[in-house]
Image (tube, rainbow, N blue to C red):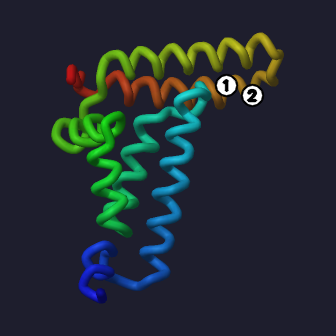
Amino acid sequence: MFKFAVSRWRTGPIARRCAWLTLGWVALALGVIGVALPLLPTTPFIILAAFAFGRSSLRLQTWLENNRTFGPIIAEWRTNGAIAPRNKAMAIAMMLAAFSASIAMGIASLVLIIQGVCMLGAAAFILSRPNYSG
């Protein structure tokens, strides 16, 4: 029984494993929420969740990597650092929609500038990644 527990969990201080596990669950939750909300990108949070689970729980890491929806995204990111063009287009479109909504709501200029700079940085990073066609 002890061997089974050790094979499921990474070794190391329990507090560190729990912190990584918590980060993994939070990132996964944000990634799932990001499917519906334009300001939360799904792919980076899923990749972060896979990384955090890899530091805390082999079982959860394997589950996420073998997931029909998220597994190919994680595998392609690990192999080539690539993002599918459809996901790139969706991310850019959502950023533009969110920024447009902020303008329409009359958000303060300083907030718009900060939001614009952050979104431009995120867009530049997303567009600079190789294309994944799988």
The residue nearer to you, when weighing 25 against 85, is: 25
Question: Left or right of 104: which side holds 43?
Answer: left
Question: Left or right of 113: which side holds 80?
Answer: left
The residue nearer to you, when weighing 40 against 110, is: 40
Q: Which mark is residue 113?
A: 1
Badge 2 crowding class, 10 Å Cα cut-off, few under 14, some 14 to 19, many 20 or more, is few
Question: Image quarter for residue 125?
Answer: top left
Q: Which mark is residue 110?
A: 2
**What amino acid is found at the position of numbered circle 2 in the picture?**
Leu
Residue at 18% from the left image edge and 36% from the top image edge:
80
Question: Left or right of 70: which side holds 32?
Answer: right
Whether residues under marks 1 and 2 lie with C-beta atoms below 8 angstroms apart, the answer is yes
Residue at 55% from the left image edge and 33% from the top image edge:
34
Q: Quadrant of the C terminus?
A: top left
Q: Position of residue 77 (x, y in %)?
A: 26, 39
Residue at 45% from the left image edge and 77% from the top image edge:
16
Q: Position of residue 97 (x, y in %)?
A: 61, 14
Q: Secondary structure at mark 2?
A: helix
Question: Image quarter for residue 40?
Answer: top right
Q: Position of residue 43 (x, y in %)?
A: 41, 36
Q: Position of residue 24 (x, y in %)?
A: 46, 57
**What amino acid is found at the position of numbered circle 1 in the picture?**
Ile
Badge 1 crowding class, 10 Å Cα cut-off, few under 14, some 14 to 19, many 20 or more, is few
Residue at 45% from the left image edge and 24% from the top image edge:
123
